[in-house]
Amino acid sequence: EPRAAARALAHAARRAAWLARPVGTIPDLDGVETDRARTVADTFLTRHPDGGWLHPRECAELLGCYGIRQAPWAWAETEDDAVLAAGRLRGFDGRVVMKGYWPGLVHKSAAHAVHLDLRGDSQVRAAFRDLETRFAGLLEGVLVQPLADRGTELCAGVVQDEVFGPLVLFGLGGAATDVLADHTARLAPLTDHDVHDLITSPRCAPLLLGADGARPADLPGLEQLLLRLSRMAADLPQLAEADFNPVLAAPGGVTVLDARVRLVPRAPHDPYLRRLR
């Protein structure tokens, strides 16, 4: 059938172009503490033999091992602690954000566990009481952060493929990430060419490159974030899933505003063998 032959030729042409591309190199990264990261993972799995999501403090420690920049935040378990934290972390125009936390919480915004643009102690207290009331029995504490400046909200993450290993994902983030599904992916460890493809492939790429005369985002910072995330995934086979959403990309820098990491015990197996589970 002629159309099938044309499609086959098109696939062959695309594959030939892909094979002709330079292989690329895996850049060296400074400030990476692989041994400390493995200790963090092993310590967590010793306490949680079945694996699970890291506490925000453990997550921050793991990201720190790879020099991944997070927005400032503080942990609070009481109303008074939240007020003190807000006083230390007043952002632009004195505003802060409060996010509820409990193990297994996936999308804080979808669960209505986020309060934005809080001004003054009274609003911080009211926000804490609201979360405490609505999520009684679940809430373990809250994260208080300065209100972030303007920028493009992105997401970056890792999932483990049973056959190919860690896969790095990148694309549009924020509340629209699941609705628009503007994502692309490459296998870790990433080369310099892979990072370029990840940044330029999503439909949101013009926002990063400076659309309509706007200043471009910090592209070198974005490249570093993806390379360091890739290195973390390659170093830690226990890393089952990582989700940085949102990542704020602005001309002045790239900052992870929210991060989640799930570890599981390392259990090597042949993915082609049948298993009940």
Image (tube, rainbow, N blue to C red):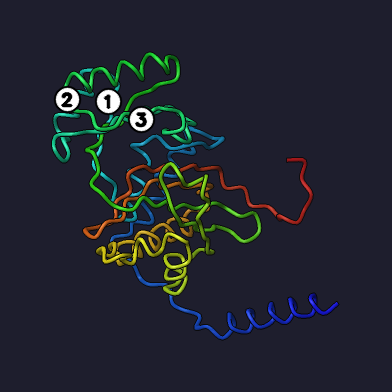
Task: Say if mark 1 contacts mark 2, CB within 8 Å.
Answer: yes
Report the residue at 36% width, 50% height from top. Answer: 153
Q: Label 3: which residue?
A: 114
- Depth check, front residue: 188 or 38: 188
113, above or below 165, in the image = above
Q: Specify the farthest residue to the right.
A: 1
Query: On the rendered structure, is 90 left or right of 128?
Result: left
Q: Please tell me whether mark 2 or mark 3 is closer to you in this view.
A: 3
- Alpha carbon of mark 2 to alpha carbon of mark 3: how far? 18 Å
For residue 139, the mark is none
202, above or below 265, in the image = below
Q: Quadrant of the N terminus?
A: bottom right
Residue 53 at what x, y percent from top left? Answer: 47, 37
Q: Amino acid at mark 2?
A: Leu
Residue 87 at what x, y percent from top left? Answer: 14, 29
Query: On the rendered structure, is 122 left or right of 48?
Result: left
Mark 1, Cα crowd under 10 Å, few <14 / some 14-19 / many 20+, is many
Mark 3, Cα crowd under 10 Å, few <14 / some 14-19 / many 20+, is some
Q: Label 1: which residue?
A: 76
